[in-house]
Every structure is written in structure tokens, then in C-alpha cells.
Amino acid sequence: METAPIEQWWDKLDPEIREWFINNPGAVILPRTVVNAINEVRGNGNGPGQLEVSAQDREFIKEMAEARRRERTGGST
């Protein structure tokens, strides 16, 4: 994604959007609803469109998804 890495604004995202990322950790192109939510959080006035997820951001999202899986399974990997 453009500008700041996702980890800098992750906590500002609505829980539903964070959940979408956790359920789709390998997504490169995001749906419009997710892009709009990101633009809202980042204050990006570019309007609707597509964003590509950077390799750095995908890695962060995968770490978040793995942490959620460990949380749900009581720490098992």
C-alpha cells in the first residue's frame, strides 16, 4: 500500500476491516469497501479505487492472522 506501512494505522481500522485482512492475508488487490475504509483512516482523499498491498504489508497481515490463529487455539501452532 502506498505511504505509511499498515502497522502504523492497523489499530485505527474498523474491526470488520481488520477481520477481512486476517481472513484474506495473501490478498494483493483489495475490494472497494476495504480501500474506502483505508482511505478514510489514512485521510487519503484520492477517492475510491484500487490499492495494491506491498510485500511488507502482506507480511504484517500474515503475522496478525497467525497471531489470531494461535489465540483461537490456545497457543498451539
Image (cartoon, rainbow, N blue to C red):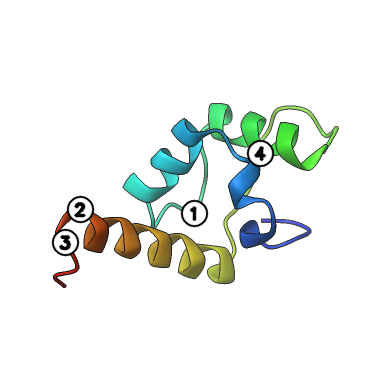
In-front residue for pair 47/12: 12
Question: Which label's residue is closer to the chain start, 2 or 1?
Answer: 1
Q: Which residue is mark 4?
A: 38
Residue 74: image tag: 3
Rendering coords of residue 19 (x, y %): 40, 40
What's the residue type where badge 2 is placed?
Arg
| Place of residue 3 in the rendered image (x, y in percent of width and height, measured from the top left) | 78, 58
Q: Is residue 46 above or below residue 56?
A: above
Kindly check if marks 3 and 1 are in contact, taking CB atoms under 8 A apart as contact. Answer: no
Using the image, determine if residue 18 lies above or below residue 14: below
Q: Report the amino acid beneath label 3.
A: Gly
Secondary structure found at label 4: helix
Label whose residue precedes the other's in the sequence (4 or 2):
4
Name the residue at 48% across, 35% down. 15
Q: Residue 58: horizontal and vertical position, in percent?
A: 49, 63
On the image, numbered disc 1 is attached to which residue? 28
| Nearer to us in this view, 7 or 29 | 7
The residue located at (77%, 42%) in the rendering is: 42
Residue 35: x percent and y percent?
62, 36
Answer with left or right where residue 12 lies relative to residue 14: right
Tell me if label 3 and label 2 are in contact, CB under 8 Å. yes
Mark 4 or 3 closer to N-term? Answer: 4
Q: Quadrant of the N terminus?
A: bottom right
Q: Residues within 10 Å of mark 1 (few under 14, many from 20)?
A: some
Label 2 secondary element = helix
- The residue tagged 2 is 72
- C-alpha gap between disc 4 and disc 3: 31 Å
As rendered, which of 69 and 39 lies closer to the eye? 69
